[in-house]
Image: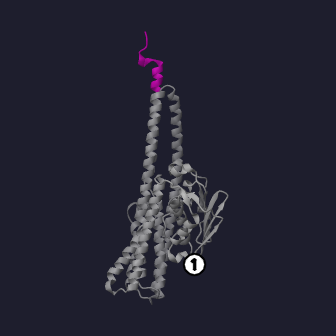
């Protein structure tokens, strides 16, 4: 008596193999879904930025009090700084930022922060330059508040490092499970080759689509984060200046109107630069910017970068060129943006009056452009994170910025088959150097970022 087809050894082995493979695939899918749920929106950079901005405004408020006591400014300046400080604390009091404060155990500090700001607001109503004791008390309270906000920023950063370590460990276990699934798939493929090949192709397509969705989601969250937080300071300056002009009205003289208008214009320019920087970085990340290789006059490009700086800063910049070729092959627009970012950073992180040196020379078939400043520098333990998107060194606390510029510069150098290097000593200054071939490969002109392997740093 012959066995029925579904009773043969071959069918049973195939059935068991399919059941085993199905179980592994289900387990791997559940694991991947769990991993995705653990990677929900949790941008600790926001908390670090908000706390640092609050610390910055607290220090500025303390400085404004001293200036008011010496008669160097009116009461409006301390009031403006206190309003900005209050707005920073307000953002920390609800929503996602408050949830993050709870996770690091600092949510209870907000009550004290708000009480300090409210008390300072009441005291400012009757404060006179001769009230030395009251000004000293307000100054001491502002300094203490700045220190507490700095502690919150540090705690948030350490919390993020712990979370990243946990995610790395979780991904490692997930990788082992995926490897096990692949081994089982290989064994089962000897029996069900056609089915497994078809399923594998479908899986690869699904994973690629999922990865693209993740990248778009990360860029979207980062952009919303920058817009909602980094843009608040210039918007607050615009609003404060406009309100001042509305209140004073016809009593303002031309010089004060010009001063307020210049503040508004500077804030608008800052908003424009922030938007351009964010959008360009996102477009590079998505591979939407292609190189337009053409002859480029490096010296003229550098002089154009200097001319684009504020007039009061142009005198601080020294340009040194040596053995430059008449022309090189590069995307002049992207290369200018890279140098522009480095020069702007050098000016921003250097004290007023300190020189910034731009050096350019050709060595063999390589172009070398370096920008040197004598500013705040970068701590040695943070150099490895320097080109990470949204990273800002602790020496940059209180100085406006997004942490996008250096990442953007690095991506531009990768497109040009080059690299960017950094040397820095804390509190002494930094030197950033761009290195790239003088003659770009022809195929590079039509390639996109996602087709290029990251250059060795």
Looking at the rendering, the stretch of residues picked out in magenta corresponds to 1-17
Left or right, residue 452 beside residue 206: right
User: Main SS type for the magenta part?
Assistant: helix
Q: Would residue 104 be visible to someone looking at this image?
A: no
Q: Residue at x 37, y 81 (%)?
A: 122
Q: Quadrant of the N terminus?
A: top left
The vertical placement of 31 against 412, above or below, is above
Closest to the observer: 84 or 197? 197
- Asked if the stretch drawn in magenta spans residue 344, the answer is no
The residue that disc 1 covers is 353
The percent position of residue 185, horizontal first and vertical second, equals 50, 32
Q: Residue at x 47, y 31 (%)?
A: 196
Closest to the observer: 284 or 98? 284
The percent position of residue 72, horizontal first and vertical second, equals 47, 87
Kind of element beneath mark 1? loop
Q: Would residue 229 be visible to someone looking at this image?
A: yes
Q: Residue at x 58, y 51 (%)?
A: 441
The number of callouts visible is: 1
The percent position of residue 177, horizontal first and vertical second, equals 51, 39
The percent position of residue 425, horizontal first and vertical second, equals 63, 68
Left or right, residue 177 beside residue 75: right
Of all residues, the one furthest to the right in this rendering is: 364
- Asked if the stretch drawn in magenta spans residue 3, the answer is yes
- Colouring style: one colour
């Amino acid at each position: 008596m012959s066995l029925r087809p579904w009773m043969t050894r071959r069918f049973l082995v195939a059935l068991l193999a399919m059941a085993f493979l199905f179980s592994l695939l289900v387990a791997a899918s559940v694991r991947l879904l769990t991993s995705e749920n653990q990677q929900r929106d949790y941008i600790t950079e926001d908390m670090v930025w908000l706390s640092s901005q609050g610390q910055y405004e607290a220090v500025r408020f303390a400085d404004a009090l001293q200036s008011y006591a010496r008669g160097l400014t009116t009461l409006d300046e301390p009031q403006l700084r206190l309003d900005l400080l209050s707005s920073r604390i307000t953002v920390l009091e609800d929503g996602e930022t408050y949830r993050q404060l709870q996770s690091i155990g600092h949510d209870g500090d907000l009550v004290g922060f708000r009480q300090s700001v409210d008390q300072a607001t009441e005291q400012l109503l009757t404060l006179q330059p001769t009230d030395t004791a009251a000004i000293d008390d307000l100054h001491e309270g502002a300094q203490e508040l700045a220190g507490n906000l700095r502690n919150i920023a540090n705690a948030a950063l350490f919390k993020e490092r712990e979370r990243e370590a946990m995610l790395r460990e979780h991904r490692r276990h997930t990788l082992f499970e995926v490897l096990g699934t692949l081994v089982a798939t290989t064994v089962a493929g000897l029996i069900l080759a056609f089915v497994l090949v078809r399923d594998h192709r479908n899986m690869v397509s699904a994973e690629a689509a999922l990865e693209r969705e993740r990248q778009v989601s990360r860029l979207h969250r980062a952009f919303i984060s920058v817009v909602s937080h980094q843009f608040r300071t210039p918007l607050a300056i615009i609003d404060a200046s406009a309100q001042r002009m509305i209140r004073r009205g016809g009593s303002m003289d031309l010089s004060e109107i010009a001063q307020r208008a210049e503040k508004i214009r500077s804030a608008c320019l800052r908003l424009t630069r922030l938007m351009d920087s964010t959008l360009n970085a996102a477009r590079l990340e998505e591979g939407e910017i292609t190189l337009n290789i053409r002859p480029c006059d490096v010296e003229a490009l550098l002089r154009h970068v200097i001319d684009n700086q504020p007039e009061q800063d142009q005198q601080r910049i020294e340009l040194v060129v040596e053995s430059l070729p008449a022309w090189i092959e590069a995307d002049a627009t992207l290369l200018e943006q890279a140098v522009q970012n480095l020069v702007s950073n050098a000016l921003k992180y250097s004290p007023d009056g300190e020189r910034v040196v731009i050096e350019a020379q050709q060595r063999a078939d390589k172009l070398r452009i370096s920008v040197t400043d004598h500013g705040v520098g970068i701590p040695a333990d943070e150099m490895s994170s320097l080109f990470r998107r949204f990273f800002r060194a602790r020496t940059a606390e209180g100085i406006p910025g997004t942490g996008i510029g250096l990442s953007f510069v690095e991506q531009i150098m990768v497109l040009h088959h080059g690299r960017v290097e950094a040397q820095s000593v804390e509190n002494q200054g930094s030197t950033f150097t761009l290195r790239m071939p003088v003659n770009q490969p022809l195929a590079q002109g039509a390639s996109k970022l996602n087709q290029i392997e990251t250059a060795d740093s």
